[in-house]
Image (cartoon, rainbow, N blue to C red):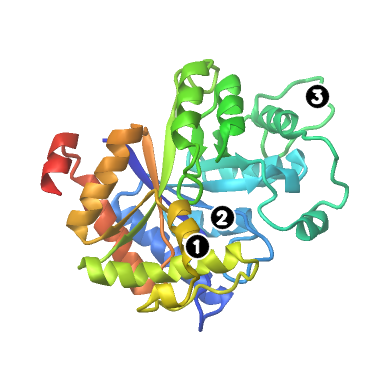
Amino acid sequence: MPKYSLLDLSPISEGQTAADALANTVELAQAAEGFGYHRYWLAEHHNMPGIASAATAVVIGHVAGSTKTMRIGAGGIMLPNHAPLVIAEQFGTLATLYPGRIDLGLGRAPGTDMATARALRRHMAPDDSFPQDVMELIGYFGDAQPDAAVRAIPGVGTQVPVWILGSSLYGAQLAAYLGLPYAFASHFAPALLTEALAVYRSTFRPSERLEKPYVMVAAGVCAADTDAEAGLLRSSQLLAFARLRSGAPGKLPRPVQDIGAQIPGPVLVQVEQALSCSATGSAASVREELGRIIDTYRPDELLLTGMIHDHGARLRSFEIAADVLSERVPAQVLRAAG
């Protein structure tokens, strides 16, 4: 049975503020620690009315200070938006404040529109420097070199674990080449999941940081006491994703009874496909669907995420998912129980 972890975007629900969302994030993180989640990751998104985790390192520090044992990290930092030294100093500081608990996942996409990307880093290079930036960043976390002209302080010697995130073959190839753990964004882009995992596992090169491949697969979850209730709760995420795809992002909508009346048929098909690596329903349904994901992809770790308008219902959803996963029963029993 793989470890299970949680990805939180600090969603800002309709009728609420960013302050509400960040307070909810702390409460969810504290609950997740009690539920047995291994790590709690936050993601960098900018210029998004429904996401409050833009200053990701700041939120990570706040969550780490509000929890005790769970690993806290970025899933991820969009490195093209930043100078590697700045990220090294931020996460070196976090690792110094919370030793042994901080992770750094790195993504290659800007995580926003190009106008916002230019506002974040005004002198953007025309060439793709992501591999070089990753290696530079890792170097800042290494042991002090007497001839180094630039050092990250804090950062030197912290050995912050670095992950490569991706939704294509590029990230899989880079993670394998550098000998780093790999997390696939299958919770919203599952199309290349099977191929990417095969590439990563077959071409992995052991490194000082990692001896053998380590795969994290992301999956959506929306659990409730009944299948019908879970389906209603999930409509918020479907509607939010459809609006994002249509170029009109907003706060996380309230759930709706008839999702087909809110989203055109062809768009809904695309949204359902993008969010298909997921489990929705009662504990029995979630057990079966998560079991199928685990059996199919054999991840070392499962990263769960879910956007639910009502904070109490979201807490309950992750509690049900944790109960299912903490059973740690053989895969054949998972199938039979469904």
Tell me how far mark 3 sits from mark 2, CA to CA.
Answer: 28 Å
Say which element carries label 2.
helix
* Quarter of the view holding residue 307: bottom left
Does residue 169 appear to the left or right of 231 in the view shown?
A: right
Q: Position of residue 337 (x, y in %)?
A: 12, 47
Say which element carries label 1.
helix
Query: In the orientation shown, which residue stands out farthest toward the bottom?
Result: 15
Q: Position of residue 203 (x, y in %)?
A: 52, 17
Depth order, front residue of 180/47 = 47
Q: Earlier in the sequence, mark 1 or mark 2?
A: 2
Is residue 223 positioned above or below 158 on the image?
A: below
Q: Report the residue marked by disc 3.
A: 148
Say which element carries label 3.
loop
Tell me how far mark 1 sits from mark 2, CA to CA.
Answer: 41 Å
Q: Residues within 10 Å of mark 2 (few under 14, many from 20)?
A: many
Q: Quick one: quadrant of the N terminus?
A: top left
Q: Report the residue marked by disc 1.
A: 266
Is residue 330 positioned above or below 142 on the image?
A: below
Q: Report the residue marked by disc 2.
A: 61
Q: Position of residue 99 (x, y in %)?
A: 51, 40
Query: In the orientation shown, which residue stands out farthest toward the front?
Result: 266
Q: Nearer the viewer, mark 3 or mark 1?
A: 1
Name the kind of residue labelled 2 in the image.
Gly
Q: Residue at x 21, y 55 (%)?
A: 285
Tell me how far mark 3 sits from mark 1, CA to CA.
Answer: 55 Å
Depth order, front residue of 70/50 = 50
Q: Position of residue 224 (x, y in %)?
A: 25, 66
Q: Residues within 10 Å of mark 3 (few under 14, many from 20)?
A: few
Does residue 23 appear to the left or right of 220 in the view shown?
A: right
